[in-house]
Image (cartoon, rainbow, N blue to C red):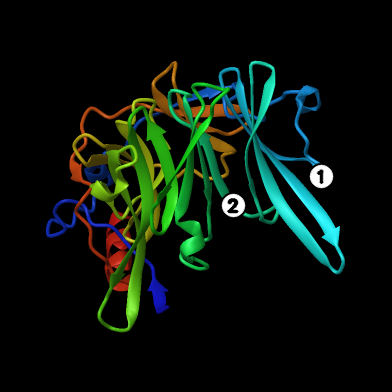
Amino acid sequence: MGKYLTICLLTICISACATDSNRYDNIKVVVLKDSFGKNSTIKTDYKKMDIDVRNGIVSIRAFENAFLIEGFWGNIIGDTIENHTDIWLYKDNQSYLLTKTKCFIDDPINLNFSKDGTKVVYQMLYYPPYGYDDSYKPIDIFDIQDLNHIKKQTIEIEKCVDYRIIRDSSLFCTEYITDLKDGTEDYSFAIYKSKLYDENNRIPVAIGAEMRVISDDGRYILAIRELYGKNKFIIIDASSSKYAYLWEDQTEYKSIYYDSERNQFAFDYGTYIKYLIMPDSFPHDALEYRYTDKFENESFWNKIK
């Protein structure tokens, strides 16, 4: 694998090379102090759940009155340690074992409910751009509408780093690597949408953007793009593949999520929450993308100063 260079994103007209931050649609922020986000630690007595997790709970996801529990096992067999993670669904005071996988306790996974709570996604993840092989292609989708007959269907997407279900559609993010023809590669991400179970007929939503959070209807995506070498949050309108920038940097937040009651993306800082006001317009083309080098990056930010 060639050397990975820092990628940067171009807005619609690079020839204009704007040096005013207002050019980048500073999305407004509302701060509510002494508030606590909905993605704060879920407090529930899992010991009352009929779940066999020998070494404990790794993580919990919740949707209304349903919980997804990732439980970790570690068995010593001779001179080796056998590890696996059990994925349980707890709903209506009943527990259901969805799947078992062999993995270590710190292996990343994608485990989430569909936006309507009728399906569960389980996906083993890797640390891009390294460590990928075909074992990471499968994505398990469990239909949990009938708890007595939970149905599992497996799809495959190459180098997928995030996958979400919105009703009968999907939004997913993959690696996006461009050969720069000089022995190096430009490394980034791309976001696609498709009909559920028809991911091979995908439609690009954004190039050079990493998906982080989506709205309940899947229309809006909070993502990260590099603007002349610096990471910036953006909001993408998936229906038009247009986006706007959040100029203000966001760091050291505890979690980010979509607040269904306020219809806003939110950064939970523990003692306060920053809500993003949805922009009036999305002026930039999310499918426009090119690599910018170190000299272009420095020139841009020096002019901004």
Label 1, residues with CA under 10 Å away: few <14, some 14-19, many ≥20: few
Q: Is residue 198 above or below residue 264?
A: below
Q: Is residue 233 visible?
A: no
Answer with the quarter of the image where residue 7 lies.
Answer: bottom left
Q: Quadrant of residue 296?
A: bottom left
Which residue is tagged 1? 55
* Amino acid under disc 2: Pro
* x 34%, y 51%: residue: 209
Say what secondary structure mark 2 lies in.
loop
Residue in the image at 33% along x and 31% along y: 218
In front of the other: 13 or 202:
202
As drawn, 35 above or below 185: above
Mark 2 touches mark 1? (CB < 8 Å) = no
Which residue is rendered at x = 42% and y = 18% of the image? 262
Q: Residue furthest front?
A: 149
Q: Is residue 87 above or below residue 63?
A: below
Q: Position of residue 82 (x, y in %)?
A: 76, 59
Q: Nearer the viewer, mark 2 or mark 1?
A: 1
Of residue 100 and residue 70, the one placed in the foreground of this image is 100
The residue nearer to you, when weighing 123 against 283, is 123
Across and down, in percent, residue 45 comes to 77, 23
Q: On the rendered image, what quadrant is the N terminus found in?
A: bottom left
Q: Position of residue 162 (x, y in %)?
A: 44, 47
Which residue is label 2 attached to?
108
Residue situated furthest right in the rendering: 78
**Pointer 2 local density, CA inside 10 Å: few below 14, some 14–19, many at least 20:** few
Disc with the residue nearer the chain's start (2 vs 1): 1
In the picture, measured across the screen, residue 259 lies left or right of residue 217, that is right
Whether residue 87 is situated above or below residue 231 in the rendered picture: above
Give 298 or 96, whichever is nearer the viewer. 96
